Image: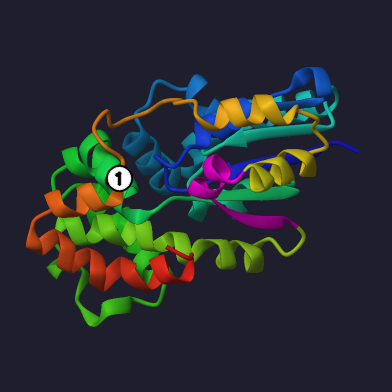
Amino acid sequence: MSQFALIAGIGHCGTKWLAQLLDRQDQGVVFYHQYKYTLTPLSWDSWLIMEHERPLAMAEYLEPYCELMQGQMRKYRVVGDAISWMPISIPDIDGRIHIDRIVYLVRNGIPQLNSIWHRSQFGRNPPDSWMFTDYMKRYWDLMGRPYKKKWNNWTQWEKTCLWWATNAFMPGWLKVQLPEAQVDVYRLEDLVGDISVLTGLVQSFGLEIPEGKLMAYQGKDVNRKIQESHDPKAIWQAWHKEWREAFVSICWPGMAQLGY
């Protein structure tokens, strides 16, 4: 029986890199990266507004998406897609097409947030935009409104830090919401730095890829957003005091939980 799998995360963490590695159609495994966006010209934040404020409108895209995935499941033993759906939406997708497995990809918060801020809507949208006033607040509410501070008093950077902090919360939440799905957390740093971890993930999908090819792929840049150094220490030194303090307050518990 074919399986449907998702690579989840908050973006800028190697999801396209992993999807391309796992896309081995000759071995019965097909993986897409953000297939949903081939169905609509909407931007990422515009899609979020439609998805959560006009759910009936979303159906016109969700239906063909599920039809395609189900059609591919008749051809391949594993069909996967990377980061088409933000973590909070994944249980809704499971209601339309059963999700067998979720690979939740995380990354050190310092380079990941640096990339998100400089190369995504988080750094471009104004602080009073829907994404910050409504969408991100949903995660804050889901997490139990941590940090004892009214949402309207959070800075835009603090809200962006919360986006990373969801990495430590959402995998456990997804396990509760989807008890029949296998939810595994992988650190990007382990996948690119430890051949045994990458080999284990590849083999768990029943794939056979020579170790030499995997090691070569570990050094391959795919969809790189920031051309400057990815070294957390160098990035940390470049951040000003307020950014560092917010990161320590909001992200440090999750960094410790995930082994950073």
Q: Nearer the viewer, residue 201 or 126?
A: 201
Residue appearing at x 75%, y 27% in the figure:
210
User: Relative to residue 70, is residue 104 depicted above or below?
Assistant: below
Q: Nearer the viewer, residue 141 or 168?
A: 168
- Residue 60 can be seen in this image: no
User: Looking at the image, what colour scheme do you see?
Assistant: rainbow
Residue on which disc 1 sits: 231
- Magenta segment boundaries in residue numbering: 181-194
Where is residue 58? Give x, y as percent.
Answer: 50, 36
Q: Is residue 183 magenta?
A: yes
Residue appearing at x 76%, y 48% in the figure:
100
Give the image quarter of residue 20.
Answer: top right
Give the image quarter of residue 154.
Answer: bottom left
Judged left or right of residue 34, residue 103 is: right
Query: Amino acid under label 1?
Result: Asp
User: Relative to residue 136, is residue 58 depicted above or below?
Assistant: above
Q: Nearer the viewer, residue 194 or 29?
A: 194
Q: Is residue 208 magenta?
A: no
Where is residue 94? Give x, y as percent.
Answer: 67, 49
User: Relative to residue 41, is residue 47 depicted above or below?
Assistant: below
